[in-house]
Image: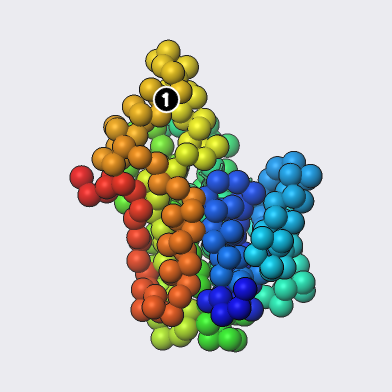
Amino acid sequence: MQNRSLSGKTALVTGSTSGIGLGIAHALAAQGAHIVLNGFGDAAVIDQMQKDIAQQHGVRTIYSGADMSKATEIEHMMREAATQMGGIDILVNNAGIQHVANVEDFPVERWDAVIAINLSSAFHTSRLALPYMKKNNWGRIINIASVHGLVGSAGKSAYVAAKHGIIGLTKVTALENAQTGITCNAICPGWVLTPLVQKQVDARAHDKSLSQEAAKHELLIEKQPSAEFVTPEQLGELAVFLCSSAASQVRGAAWNMDGGWAAQ
Ligand code: NAD
């Protein structure tokens, strides 16, 4: 386990108890980064996730159950990370939710929640992580946006607005730190089969009386030319690359991994 590219670094991955965040946490830990896990879920399951990451990759892990819609809980999480791990070198803003409804039917409370979790949380974690990164003149901020940060889809006003917003935040954070060792970039995945997308598959299967396989294929073929899901493991490897020295001049990018979705 020696000579791993991120040995001695600490990475916080928000929303890492599931899906893409968990995949990224494993990929960073495989390169030697200690991990701060965050997200919701069953306590025993999360405890096991923490143990799996620590044992498989020989790194330290801590867990924060902070709610990313609440600035005070984010502040508490960042203080805990500083106390227990020394500080955050790699920040992956990944926590996110979805809600599908047309603008005139969109519940106001859901709008506020999507903007808070998918966009404002990244502002709060970034503003709190940057002073430590500046002290070391090294840092990586990776914002998990979406292909919906680049193009729109009907029914997803809050999500598309938040994801376009986080790409804006990415550019400004990158520019403000352009002459430092701190980079900030966004990753823009297309469809990834996680619980967030499974809900949309289930809704389609139910509404159109389709099998799971048919609903998945229909969902993919509508937008994603490869007709294959992107995987959390592939996204994890892209995050590892963005943390590498080879990527030190990748700044303010919105890097899509979307099976060709945004190329259309
Ligand atoms: P997921 O539902 O599998 O995981 C979401 C994670 O966020 C979970 O760990 C959950 O507990 C956590 N979370 C939700 N609300 C939270 C809150 N208030 N505070 C703290 N944690 C919270 O979803 P996923 O598909 O892995 O999505 C992860 C990110 O990737 C999201 O930002 C999503 O928008 C983005 N994304 C997903 C896809 C896709 O196809 N799945 C595509 C593009 C972008």
Which residue is at 31% across, 46% downward?
Answer: 259
Is residue 177 in view from this perspective? no
Q: Nearer the viewer, residue 241 or 153?
A: 241
Residue neighbourhood size for the residue with mark 1, other residues' Cα within 10 Å, grouped as few (<14), some (14–19), many (≥20):
few
- Coordinates of residue 53 in the picture (x, y in percent): 67, 59
Q: Is residue 68 left or right of residue 183?
A: right
168 up-or-down from 100: above or below: below
Q: Nearer the viewer, residue 166 or 82?
A: 82
Is residue 194 in view from this perspective? yes
Q: Is residue 211 left or right of residue 80?
A: left
- Coordinates of residue 162 in the picture (x, y in percent): 45, 50
Indicate the secondary structure of the residue bearing disc 1. helix
- Coordinates of residue 57 in the picture (x, y in percent): 65, 65
Tell me which colouring the rendered structure shows. Answer: rainbow
Q: Say which amino acid is labelled 1.
A: Glu
Q: Is residue 211 left or right of residue 42?
A: left
Which residue is at 44% across, 18% downward?
Answer: 211
Q: Quadrant of the N terminus?
A: bottom right
Q: Which residue extends farthest left?
A: 264
Q: Which residue is mark 1?
A: 213
Which residue is at 54% across, 58% downward?
Answer: 24
Q: Quadrant of the C terminus?
A: top left
Which residue is at 79% across, 44% downward?
Answer: 44
- Coordinates of residue 99 in the picture (x, y in percent): 50, 35
The quadrant in which residue 250 appears is bottom left
Q: Which residue extends farthest front?
A: 1
Count of numbered badges drawn on the protein: 1
